[in-house]
Amino acid sequence: MSELPRVDPTRDLSAPARAYAAVLRTPPGRWIAINVAARVDPALMRATKGRVGMGLMLPSALLTTIGAKSGQERTSTVLYFHDGEDVILVASSFGREKHPAWFHNLKANPLVRIARDGGGAPRTAEEVVDPAELDRLWALADRIYPPYADYRRRTAAVGRRIPIVRLRPA
């Protein structure tokens, strides 16, 4: 099983990571993230054993869920960070109107795996619902990926709340 590199959300983003996140905040950057990176990344990360992905210097990994309808394994690229031993995910879907498919999958079957190369030890997913905990985790998430603030504004405008998910060791 592969290790998931630890991501400390209290550390400042590097200058290149901040610059890359700024590009992703632009309409062309967002379009590329939605229409190219989201489709290419799982295969690219698997082929390179997690060393190369379109997330570049952002903390990205492959999340493996079981399809809510199909029952088949599904793999998606996600940004993540650690909170103690837990892994935190933000179901932003780039600020679109609907939750990402991986979120629906883990709600139906909360046993997941996450790793840079698509493996990983089993973890149990649970949506964070406590308002104070959500505020704390949003503050950390915004440090990892500043465009999350833009995504919250976009989804609020269409009545969607972006979920935060905690992955605990199974």
Image: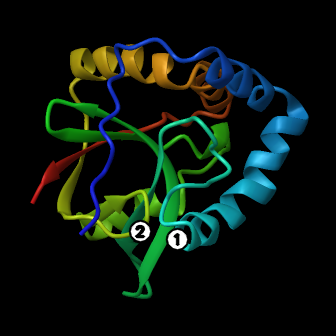
Residue 56, image x, y percentages: 64, 42
How far across and how far down the image is residue 74, in percent? 46, 76
Amino acid bearing label 1: Arg
- State how many labels appear: 2
Q: Give the residue at mark 1.
A: 46
The x and y percentages for residue 169 are: 12, 53
Quarter of the picture containing the C terminus is: bottom left
Number of residues whose C-alpha sits closer than 10 Å to that of mark 2, classed few (under 14), some (14–19) or many (20 or more): many
Placement of the N terminus among the 4 image quadrants: bottom left
Q: Is residue 41 left or right of residue 106?
A: right
Q: Label 1 to label 2, Cα distance in Å?
A: 6 Å
Which residue is more in the foreground, 160 or 24?
Answer: 24
Q: Is residue 7 above or below residue 107?
A: above
Residue position for label 2: 118
Earlier in the chain: of badge 1 and badge 2, it is 1
Percent x, y of residue 47: 57, 73
- In the image, what residue occupies the spot 60% across and 50% down? 98
CB-based contact (under 8 Å), mark 1 and mark 2: yes
Q: Secondary structure at mark 1?
A: helix
Residue at image coords 60%, 46%: 93
Vertical arrangement, residue 14 with respect to residue 166, above or below? above
Q: Is residue 38 left or right of residue 159?
A: right
Callout 1: 10 Å neighbours few (<14), some, many (20+)?
A: some
Asked if residue 65 lies left or right of residue 101, the reply is: left
- Closer to the camera in the image, 127 or 65: 65
- Residue plotted at (67% across, 58% down): 38
Name the residue rendered at 74%, 51% in the picture.
34
Q: Which numbered marker is on residue 83? A: none
> In which quadrant of the rendered view does residue 29 lie?
top right
Please tell me whether mark 2 sits on a helix, a strand or a loop: loop
